[in-house]
């Protein structure tokens, strides 16, 4: 396992390179050095722009593709999500597809979000806290 401090910044150019490589080779996490499930991801922000980052669902290594942010360690949480998701709709937390009236809802959060209990699941209203943290090493969806 490599320490986060040894890992340099990650730019949008690096992200695009990883995206291009991803179809042909298995990218390795720079921290735990396993190849699954690690990769570049993108996620729409509220303002319509895209957040680009890379993340490892094996050890919680996470890094923004902005060319300057140091990597950080995320935590994996799961809660029993009680709430109706209609047919064809997705859980806003974990992308579980409806119809379901409850499901186990995994979510990657920062340590600060868990500590401050600042993440609330939009489906069930559950506040995710440290009691919901589970170990890394299983493949989150
Ligand atoms: Zn890793
Ligand atoms: Zn939930
Ligand atoms: Zn969910």
Image: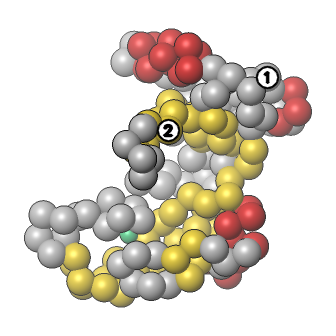
Quote the CA–CA distance across marks 2 and 1: 19 Å
Disc 1 crowd, CA 10 A, few/some/many (<14, 14-19, 20+) = some
Q: Report the number of numbered marks.
A: 2
Residue 51: mark in rendering: 2
Provide the residue designation for mark 1.
8
Residue 51 to residue 125: above or below: above
In the picture, measured across the screen, residue 99 lies left or right of residue 136, that is: left
Secondary structure state at the residue bearing disc 1: loop
Is residue 36 visible in the rendered image? The answer is: no
Residue 77 to residue 29: above or below: below
Which quarter of the figure has residue 5? top right
Ligand 3 picture quarter:
bottom left
In the picture, measured across the screen, residue 1 lies left or right of residue 59, that is: right
Is residue 37 visible in the rendered image? The answer is: yes
Residue 128: mark in rendering: none
Q: Identify the residue at image location x=46%, y=75%.
A: 121
Secondary structure state at the residue bearing disc 2: strand
Indicate the position of residue 93 as horizontal and vertical percent values.
Answer: 41, 65
Residue 51 to residue 103: above or below: above
Which quarter of the figure has residue 71? top right
In the picture, measured across the screen, residue 34 lies left or right of residue 20, that is: right
Residue sitting at the far front: 47
């Amino acid at each position: 396992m490599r320490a986060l401090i040894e890992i340099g910044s990650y730019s949008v150019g690096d992200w695009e390179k990883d995206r291009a490589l991803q179809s042909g080779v298995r990218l390795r996490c720079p921290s735990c050095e396993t190849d699954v499930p690690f990769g570049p991801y993108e996620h729409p922000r509220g303002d319509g722009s895209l957040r680009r980052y890379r993340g490892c669902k094996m050890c919680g290594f996470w890094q923004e593709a902005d060319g300057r942010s140091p990597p950080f360690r995320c935590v994996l949480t799961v809660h029993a999500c009680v709430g109706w998701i209609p047919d064809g709709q997705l859980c806003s937390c974990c992308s579980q597809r409806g119809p379901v009236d409850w499901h186990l809802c995994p979510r990657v959060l920062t340590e600060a979000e868990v500590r401050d209990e600042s993440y609330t699941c939009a489906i069930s209203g559950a506040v995710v806290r440290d009691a919901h943290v589970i170990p890394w090493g299983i493949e989150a969806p």
